[in-house]
Image (cartoon, coloured by chain):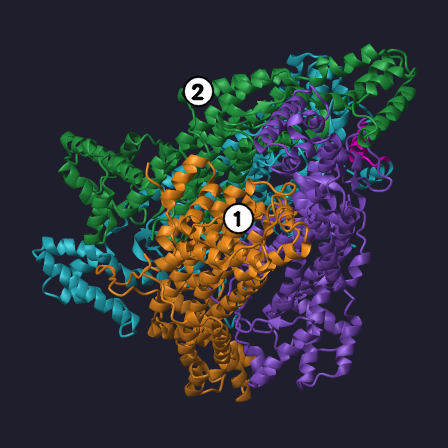
Chain colours: A green, B orange, C purple, D cyan
Amino acid sequence: MDQIANVLANRYASNEMRAIWSAEGRIIIERDLWIAVMKGQRDLGLGISDETIAAYEAVRDNVDLESIRKREEVSHHDVKARIDEFCELAGEQQIHRGMTSRDLTENVEQLQVFRSMDLIVKKSCAALLRLAKLAHKYRDVLLVARTHNVAAQPTTLGRRLAMYGEELCYHIEKMEAIMGKYPARGLKGPVGTRVDQYTLFEGDEEKVNALERKVLAYLNIWNSFKETGQIYPRSLDLEVVEAVVQLSSAPSNFATTLRLMAGMELASEGFAKGQVGSSAMPHKMNARSCERICGFRVILNGYLTMASGLSGSQWNEGDVSCSVVRRVMLPDTFFTIDGLMDTFITVLDQMEIYLPMIEQEARRYLPFIATTTILMEATKAGAGREDGHEAIKEHAVATARELRNGTIKENDLADRLAADPRLKLSKEKIEQLIYRNRNLVGMAPEQVDHFVGEARRVGERHPEAIDYQPGAIL
Amino acid sequence: MDQIANVLANRYASNEMRAIWSAEGRIIIERDLWIAVMKGQRDLGLGISDETIAAYEAVRDNVDLESIRKREEVSHHDVKARIDEFCELAGEQQIHRGMTSRDLTENVEQLQVFRSMDLIVKKSCAALLRLAKLAHKYRDVLLVARTHNVAAQPTTLGRRLAMYGEELCYHIEKMEAIMGKYPARGLKGPVGTRVDQYTLFEGDEEKVNALERKVLAYLNIWNSFKETGQIYPRSLDLEVVEAVVQLSSAPSNFATTLRLMAGMELASEGFAKGQVGSSAMPHKMNARSCERICGFRVILNGYLTMASGLSGSQWNEGDVSCSVVRRVMLPDTFFTIDGLMDTFITVLDQMEIYLPMIEQEARRYLPFIATTTILMEATKAGAGREDGHEAIKEHAVATARELRNGTIKENDLADRLAADPRLKLSKEKIEQLIYRNRNLVGMAPEQVDHFVGEARRVGERHPEAIDYQPGAIL
Amino acid sequence: MDQIANVLANRYASNEMRAIWSAEGRIIIERDLWIAVMKGQRDLGLGISDETIAAYEAVRDNVDLESIRKREEVSHHDVKARIDEFCELAGEQQIHRGMTSRDLTENVEQLQVFRSMDLIVKKSCAALLRLAKLAHKYRDVLLVARTHNVAAQPTTLGRRLAMYGEELCYHIEKMEAIMGKYPARGLKGPVGTRVDQYTLFEGDEEKVNALERKVLAYLNIWNSFKETGQIYPRSLDLEVVEAVVQLSSAPSNFATTLRLMAGMELASEGFAKGQVGSSAMPHKMNARSCERICGFRVILNGYLTMASGLSGSQWNEGDVSCSVVRRVMLPDTFFTIDGLMDTFITVLDQMEIYLPMIEQEARRYLPFIATTTILMEATKAGAGREDGHEAIKEHAVATARELRNGTIKENDLADRLAADPRLKLSKEKIEQLIYRNRNLVGMAPEQVDHFVGEARRVGERHPEAIDYQPGAIL
Amino acid sequence: MDQIANVLANRYASNEMRAIWSAEGRIIIERDLWIAVMKGQRDLGLGISDETIAAYEAVRDNVDLESIRKREEVSHHDVKARIDEFCELAGEQQIHRGMTSRDLTENVEQLQVFRSMDLIVKKSCAALLRLAKLAHKYRDVLLVARTHNVAAQPTTLGRRLAMYGEELCYHIEKMEAIMGKYPARGLKGPVGTRVDQYTLFEGDEEKVNALERKVLAYLNIWNSFKETGQIYPRSLDLEVVEAVVQLSSAPSNFATTLRLMAGMELASEGFAKGQVGSSAMPHKMNARSCERICGFRVILNGYLTMASGLSGSQWNEGDVSCSVVRRVMLPDTFFTIDGLMDTFITVLDQMEIYLPMIEQEARRYLPFIATTTILMEATKAGAGREDGHEAIKEHAVATARELRNGTIKENDLADRLAADPRLKLSKEKIEQLIYRNRNLVGMAPEQVDHFVGEARRVGERHPEAIDYQPGAIL
């Protein structure tokens, strides 16, 4: 029976993410851990030479799964098989001293998580910079903002984009904060008492503590649990998975709104270069990628339920109920967000805006939206407040009704108001109040500028993000 | 970059389940659908010959993924590639008439779901029959029932097992009921109006309806949606996933309790033949498989969240936000329950019961539990009710305290009560009331008998279940 | 400190549902249980007279919470307080014989669940009949069906409604099926062995079994668990909660689509009588109730997670981890679906359809959608297939582009095609193919008829549903 | 129909938490917001006097719900009713200038959330200090650590408690971090463009920005969203709810393990003062409060699903699908964690440890656990390595078997090993290696010390925590 592929990994995720969670990738990370431990033990006088370490480092990437599998067939012990393989490649026998199985698995999985977070922060940042660019481009394009999916007030298209951008920015900084204090489980032995390292260092507590600090430093992790048991608390996995769910929120909000805009032909997610639409259905530009982003969000919510199902359910110093869950939840969470971010970036790069349609929509709704302003000006021009209010109400209701029953095709409220002597306003004045009234959008343009600045600030911490280009998506 | 394997499929699920969801398996099911449609169209006079159908049937299992992949590279159209492949193999061109892409995908996925349910019902039934056998075997073994994880009242070990058995039985019958009315989406065209089949049959509604009935009959499905849109309502997926979660409940309740019993050395999940425990830790028989069952349950809860995230969130006649979710959720739900059931059956086959430990526990707690009965008998024997109550209270509290502070190692409450003249009961009488008192367990034995009968009744519907033997689990 | 109100109960749910879950309602149901047990015990010769039972029945609805509270202050025992109250009211002392605390609580809660399901089925049925009426009314109104939120193919408005109706119908029948086999926990004593009833009937198993059957019959419940422990399996709660989630799916799909239609001014959820919109914003008819329906769905998904968190996590014969969860989850699930159904019915009663807007939308998209048919007819009329295809493609793409860039306001593809000699079709013919072509909607009208029949069939089982009128919603 | 009470609020939560979420509490917080806005507007020259502000402040706590209700009956406008009430009480008319409905509701709810977090941090800290005290007390009490619920290695009881303490500490600091950057929505107007404040300040952007900074400062909030729309991103609610779920993890891990320990009579959650156990069942000290803690965790997971159901599902600038969800989810999340923490603290105050039982357990398992050490020493003493290993294996397996089949009651492995000449170790030496071997627990005592220091450090930030005493729990 052939293997069943992990659809999230192989269909949606990137090579970089797969490299972290593949069988080979895991072995390389495990070797990184062994090397870091050796370096720490060397520093603390356990008699491990630089040459030994160099020998291991030289073969670190030399991963032969088949050879390991064969060793395991003989020894029936998976960790031993991998130790033997690495040692034989290096021609040394110095790894895994004072370590137990959990010292390996817990830390390796945490390293996978940590490196995945790092990759996702970079991609999120790439998306953020795209959003900033687009927000800046459409900074002043008047757009009808909607609440309850109904036209509500004017905004600008750039400001709508800035709204998602700010949300994304918040979550990027959150994930950076999690990484900054992400506590590794460290070398704690089978139940957490560090008994093996304690024995190895003959009861020298200082050295046991120093070893852990050194190992983490070699791995570029900055924090560790000190009193954890067999396993680190699974609430930490929950924290990570939830931060990933949060990161999906801004893209999903964006994608939802683009799907809505596509339904009104205000925008579309565009096509990849070379892709063509159906000739018979030239209007049909399906927001498939945006739909997929929304789907990814639903998937992540499921992994969040798994994570919360583990958090707080530990028996004693630890049990392995969580094992099978984490084998699924951790990689699949990261494959999902990885695919989501690449999809999001692709949509940002390819989306099309139909400015004439946006303007047409504005012409339909702005007259209604601007009536408050018109009334204010009418009063200034000498109209009676009650008369003015009554006049506006009459015409607005009539216009809306006639638009809906098809009597008229375009909103002619401005004409009606201009023609009504009660309001004492010229058509030109009214049109100016409706269509050439910068104040209607409040501080939308300045909000765009603020967001662009924030995005730049965050982007500077991840200089590689600006040039990030995802591979072609399906 | 190599493929990442689906860990649930490849590590835990069975060949049979993988066969349903593999790339090859999907193609075979798709061909089953095409063949069923042709048969229906033949029956309704669309000029398809038996020979044509036979030609397709003859090559149904001849799946060459590589060849299909190459065709797709040329045509850039996945469905067309599979049609061409099948047609060329058969030397005919009669499949997919009046069908659209959704007519294929929706029904194929439903067939995968349906066949998976069928397999799971069979395995659940195999577990049920094992439980019945064990319940019968331990029908009369006195066991201290616990509530709040504390000794509460006597029961029998067989009755404890029957408790899980009845729950499992209920959920098996539920899944059978779902299968009995599981509605296929059928051939409804792109938005559900059946416009293509309607055109094919030149507006003959009767024939369009008849075609669907026939196709389903050929596929052994008994129901269909009639007014569905582009997609069948995703609440149906929720129903299926939830039924799977329910099926996991009895095994998970059982596994949880076995883990508790293992902690008190009343039982263990045993070892596979040939497997050995650690010589240094001969007491340590880890309930790893039971822990895994509990982990599978947590995974399923995550897929349930995905399913409920889709249910009720459809836009218009359908959108594809659900697509990526279902690609993950549907197969992975079934891989999980498949692995869970095989694990459960394996534990049932290998578990060990430590009867002397169970008896030892009973001796510790039964005297406390039986005091109500003792008081009743003491009164009958002439003791004053208040005196008797006081005497029992004094001795019980003292005994419990001394057991806990280690003054005594065994519960000697019977001796104390016999020695107290206020109770007027001989030690023999008291011991009989405590240790040889069939009434203490109420109808536990009869409950076992009832369950065994029910299990047998359900088992008769699935004769292949009794001999089902899962492969070796990890 | 004042009480905090349950917002779901008091803001959204109906009096009928509150009556089931209120403190008073619970006491009445508990008394129903006691009376049913007495009747069963009377029938089986335990010497309880009809007069005694009548005395209890006469005071069943006489609930004085304050009096019960005072009794509990004295006895510090809640069940005893309620027993004493009921007995004193009746002037008898025959209730609760051979019953334990769990015999009360488990069954009372199940009765609350059962009666809630009954109420919800009735309301769902009321919604179903409304949907059927509307579907029939709009049976033949041409509507552009959308997939990916983009115009896809013609359907009818009635058929769109029938789509939700069929889904609702399926879930109503599912809940009916659950009710039909919903197993009460029955009188099983503290750990499930029925030891108390067994003692009461002096070991006569037949009578113990008969008692349970009789009690359930008096309560109009038709099934029971036989081998359950202290508690019935919580997977049963999961089944119920999930069935409620399923019931919310069709209303939520409907509400989502109505929100989309409102955004395009095709429809609105309307106003309650007397309610007025904003004069300044006459276009703004917010689909607030539909949004609330979607919100209710999200709430229900949360309770589903709670339910799945309990299912399969039982320790031994039972523990009370589930207690606090069920106190929240069970009533709140039913308050939510109750509010949802009343909201849904209200929207169905008040919604407005803007037929001219629907027609206007059709005029925009139908020409694109009908091109396949036009090509077919052009070929029949003598046009070359390749020429025809080319001509259609050219004009369709140009028309779509011009519509989007505002060059034209209305789709004039028909004119362009008529003017193109390559197609050999008159404008009249083309317009007929586009606008007066019954075949475009396939079997949509017949699908409406089918659904209306199904709704009627289900409605006949719930004759009170047709006149059900919810109270005013917020 | 009487109101249905919120069971979480009224049965489990504290007065302090109820005060935040009650109808009165909400009005007071709303008034705080209005006052803060007035102060900001005063500072920025909008002509609001200190006297005016003082007049409002003087009546801030004067909440008359009935009066407000009557006003609303007249005006049919809830916000207006509350404005009028407050103004009439103060004899001024200066609140709510340039504010819209969402400026009120969003910020008020965020203030409720923020103050709830503050309360929960305090309570969590109170629990942390209790844990530290207990960990210190039992720092050196040898305890058998368990993995897979089976004895694994020695630890100390204090160290087990420190394990939960460290986890709790991590989550407290996380919630503090969230509070430190929790962004208020601020005064953004109906769609986020700040148009009303912009108009009020006649286009002076600096003043609009300054106003928001000032308002937040008066409210003791330190951050705000700048580009949010009608609503702040619901991913922020998710962040908060998730942080609450995390906070529940350590208590729930602790409670789970205490339930396990209670099952083996190593500990119990004790009784409240004055509470008595059943005389007939003196062994039965039910860990009901611990079970409740575990139940609270399951509830929180449900609210987490609700929160993730909202995150990322926003339409355009905002919709109110989230409204009903947040009305339930936000208060109920905090009522739950509030009840959980009070329950946790109560258990920590009342729990009982049965040291003799812990020692008895150690005597049963330590000999097995210590065999590795014994072998090492035997080799040093001159035993052959293979012989030693063989001897230990023989005796260990035999001892374990005899313990399980009841042949022996106590672990006599030490005797057997001492009697075996192959090992060359005296009984005294062996007993020393098993029972008086400080090294077996590794660094457990030092880990306790480390945790106690950490708890103290966090505690110093919340000086009121140390004296916090919850009210009596049910």
Q: Which amino acid does label 1 sit on?
A: His
Q: Mark 1 points at which residue?
A: B96
Residue C388 quadrant: top right
What chain does badge 2 belong to?
A
Question: From where the camera sits, is residue D412 visible?
Answer: no
From which residue to which does the magenta span run?
Answer: D75-90
In the depicted structure, whether residue B128 falls above or below residue A425: below
How far apart, in angstroms, are the residues tagged by discs 1 and 2? 47 Å
Percent from the top left, x then y, of residue D257? 42, 55
Residue A186 quadrant: top left
Name the one closer to the observer, B273 or A467.
A467
Percent from the top left, x then y, of residue B332? 45, 50
Task: Decide: few, some or many residues near mark 2? Use Cα within 10 Å; few <14, some 14-19, many ≥20.
Answer: some
Magenta-colored stretch includes residue D56: no
Percent from the top left, x then y, of residue C314? 49, 61
In the depicted structure, whether residue C347 falls above or below residue A224: below
Q: Which residue is drawn at 55% across and 74% down?
A: C226
Image position of B356 (left or right of B282): right
Q: Residue at x 67, y 81 (%)?
A: C41
Name the one closer to the observer, B179 or C97.
B179
Q: Name the residue under label 2.
A: A466
Q: Which residue is the extreme one toward the bottom? A: B381
